[in-house]
Image (cartoon, helix red, strand yellow):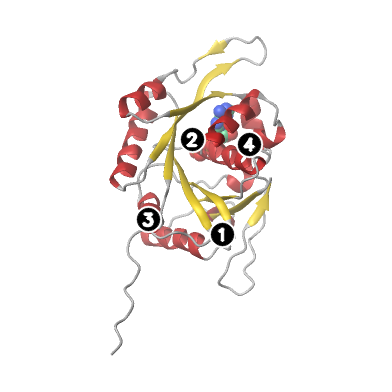
Amino acid sequence: LKPKPAAPQGPQKVPGVDRILAIASGKGGVGKSTVSANLACALAAEGRRVGLLDADVYGPSQPRMLGVSGRPASPDGKIILPLRNHGVTMMSMGLMTNDDQAVVWRGPMLMGALQQMMTQVQWGALDVLIVDLPPGTGDVQMTLAQKSQVDGAIIVSTPQDIALLDARKGIDMFQQLNVPILGMIENMSTHICSNCGHEEHVFGHGGVAAEADKLNVPLLAEIPLDLQIRMAADGGAPIVTSQPDSAQAKAFHAIAQTL
Ligand code: ADP
């Protein structure tokens, strides 16, 4: 009898993918997908080969944010061909379900779908694969960290206590899973009225900086609550591509350059 080769243990690398970066948040609606889309576009504009995996199965928003639609082709029924726009290779759980179909998958199905996205999608050679995670600390996050070698996580939060409380849990989870925390981003940090220039802290300000300091992780950026950022994301061309010279685009480039 020949001894069987040992089954691979622990987190695996995705073939052809140099680094996997997870973008996470404790709560939904804090701008995690907006940040993911803009960072992916910023990295692509800087000449890096970028993939974006939208793993937010409950509220997939990357097809809309990156302006792609249609079902990805699978010529042999196994390999799935990703879509591409703004220089970003993209795959979303949202492209595998109908737009108005609610996803009521149980944990094992979610984990299976994520694994399929990692291993059956023809990502090609990538410098960075960004994974836009669902909010919280559930099955998808655990599966990603346990099955794939995640090189770092970025936590997006608004400055509100309630969002920060959940963000803290996310950081704790990644630390337990041995995923390095690259830093935190305060989104919707401040609002400057496009009419009169008055600055208001709609969700408070500085909460993420204080938290990052307490947890000893870098604060990567404070992104304002800004109409242009919202309109660009909703219009399928993130602000980094639609207004590349804007201050908002530069803020995302500054983060991308640290990655
Ligand atoms: P999440 O992925 O955390 O659920 P999204 O990125 O989908 O959050 O953002 C939720 C909504 O807020 C979207 O409509 C998005 O366009 C908007 N949004 C996110 N960040 C900003 C921002 N900095 N300024 C204005 N609108 C934003």
Considering the numbered disc 1 on the image, is that residue within a helix, a strand or a loop? helix
Whether pointer 2 and pointer 3 mark residues with C-beta atoms closer than 8 Å, the reply is no
Q: How many marks?
A: 4
Please, what is the three-letter code of the amino acid marked with disc 3? Thr
Name the mark on residue 29.
2
User: Pointers 3 and 1 in contact (CB under 8 A)?
Assistant: no
Q: Can the viewer see residue 55 in this picture?
A: no
Q: Sequence order check: which comes first, mark 3 or mark 1? A: 1
Q: Does 93 sit left or right of 44 as displayed?
A: left
Q: Is mark 4 within 8 Å of ligand 1?
A: yes
Q: Which residue is mark 3?
A: 143
| 22 sits to left or right of 223 | left
Q: Is mark 2 within 8 Å of ligand 1?
A: yes
Q: Residue at x 40, y 25 (%)?
A: 208
Q: Nearer the viewer, residue 71 or 240?
A: 240
Q: Quadrant of residue 134?
A: top left
The residue that disc 4 covers is 233
Label 3 CA crowd tier, 10 Å (few <14, some 14–19, many 20+): some
Percent position (x, y) of residue 169? 31, 37
